[in-house]
Amino acid sequence: MKNYNLNISAPTDGRYSSLCQETNNIFSEHNLIKMRVKVEIEWLIFLSNQKNIETLPKISESQTKKLRKIYQEFSLKDSLSVKKIEDTTKHDVKAVEYFIKNRIKKNKLVNRYNEHIHICCTSEDINNIAYSLMIKEGRDLLINQANMLERAIKSMGKKYKSVAMLSHTHGQPASPTTMGKEFINFQKRFSAQIDDLKNIQIKGKFNGATGNYSAHSIAYPKINWPLSMKRFVNSLKLEFNSHTTQIEPHDYIADICHKINHINSILIGFSQDIWTYISKNYFSQKNIKGEIGSSTMPHKINPINFENAEGNLGMSNAISQYFATKLVISRLQRDLSDSTVLRNIGLVYAYSIIAYKNILLGLNKLDLNKVKIANDLDECWEILAEPIQMVARKYQISNSYEILKKYTRGKKVDKMTIKKIIESLDIPASEKNRLLELTPKKYIGYAKKLCDVK
């Protein structure tokens, strides 16, 4: 039996936690503390390797390994120790500094230089890098899940590339396509946006209280601090932001939020289209034993995965849109309004991943109803008015559009009606024969071939 925690308000931590546990782990308070510890320790190690810092000798390789173990083996118990210190300090980053100092007390060599922990730093130096590391890991997780979904959509596109289907523009019958081509349309868009998301540079700053390396230049004037800080931030696999106030301005976070928003909007469209195809009976859904669609109508198999996905994609977009507009604004050189907002950044990823997994679950339940799709095509011969008109225009037949409109607009047209129209046209016999061989099912242009274009 599942272990249900029913005394929480956020569905990402409760009802849907099994779908986004990895995301929750990345953006948890525990992991945030761990990342802060990592940044503080890596900063101390980096400083010890600088030639012009005479007050801190180079930390040996063995001592470096011991220091890194503090964050590599960082446990929930360690997090609780930090939180206990914070109960007194009322400052989360200062609590991390004191925690590290406590941990290295037994290491006499390193402990001798413990005042170099957090030296020249402002809290935001530690925090912005910690968040950057978490966001980077979260993005990788989201992209992995998105790639799984993209591959599934592409696979269904290939599978159904030859299944001719009636299109519906403005909800009305239109020139046919193939079911596969409609999947590939979404797959191409989705794939392009995933690539864009991958290419957004995740940034970090480490330049002190107002971004000017002021404390650094007084404490250690012989060091080229902008260059050194670039090396430090790059060593953590982040892009260096050279010009900031006290805070990293979060422009890259806004870019990520906008891109996730774009990806999710594409998937909302996809979910709604699949929902519509199900309602048209173009897809049936597998009857999963034990599942119930309606509490009163036992026959129903509802498209709940696509509805769930649409709702969760909307939640992610609502939050990400606020982040993108809020986080890039800060009063003068610093205000704290971004801090409480950033603590919710994981929700953008959690709601997205819940949705991606639901779409994948929904796709795996679908069975194509080829009979229904074929019948709808066979009942819409009027859609051939378009190609007939084009051939008539080719041979300069006056009022070609009006002629076809007269016979087809708002009318039920059958095969015989189309045949009469074609035979009445003053066009070469070869063109007449080609049009007479045309059927709604055959009128798909390059739809099938486009499914194989890379």
Image (tube, helix red, strand yellow):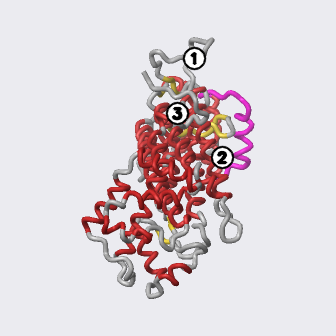
Query: Along the horizontal axis of the image, is 319 left or right of 158?
Result: right
Cα–Cα gap, marks 2 and 1:
31 Å
Q: Position of residue 49 (x, y in %)?
A: 34, 76
- Do the residues bearing badges 3 and 1 touch, measured as CB atoms within 8 Å? no
- Do the residues bearing badges 2 and 1 touch, measured as CB atoms within 8 Å? no
- As displayed, is residue 236 above or below residue 345? below
First in sequence: mark 3 vs mark 1:
3
Q: Which mark is residue 300?
A: 1
First in sequence: mark 2 vs mark 1:
1
Residue ID at (48%, 53%): 33
Which residue position holds label 2?
A: 318
- Secondary structure, mark 2, is helix
Residue ID at (46%, 33%): 18
401 or 264, nearer to the observer: 264
Let me know if residue 196 appears in the view: no
Residue ID at (41%, 53%): 454
- Secondary structure, mark 1, is loop
Is residue 408 covered in magenta? yes
- Which quadrant of the figure has residue 311? top right
Tag 3: Cα neighbours inside 10 Å, few (<14), some, or many (≥20)? Answer: some
First in sequence: mark 2 vs mark 3:
3
Q: Amino acid at mark 2?
A: Ala
Cα–Cα gap, marks 2 and 3:
18 Å
161 or 146, nearer to the observer: 146
Q: Amino acid at mark 3?
A: Tyr
Tag 2: Cα neighbours inside 10 Å, few (<14), some, or many (≥20)? Answer: few
- Between disc 2 and disc 1, the foreground one is 2
Which residue position holds label 3?
A: 16
- Secondary structure, mark 3, is loop
Q: Which residues make up the magenta segment? A: 395-416
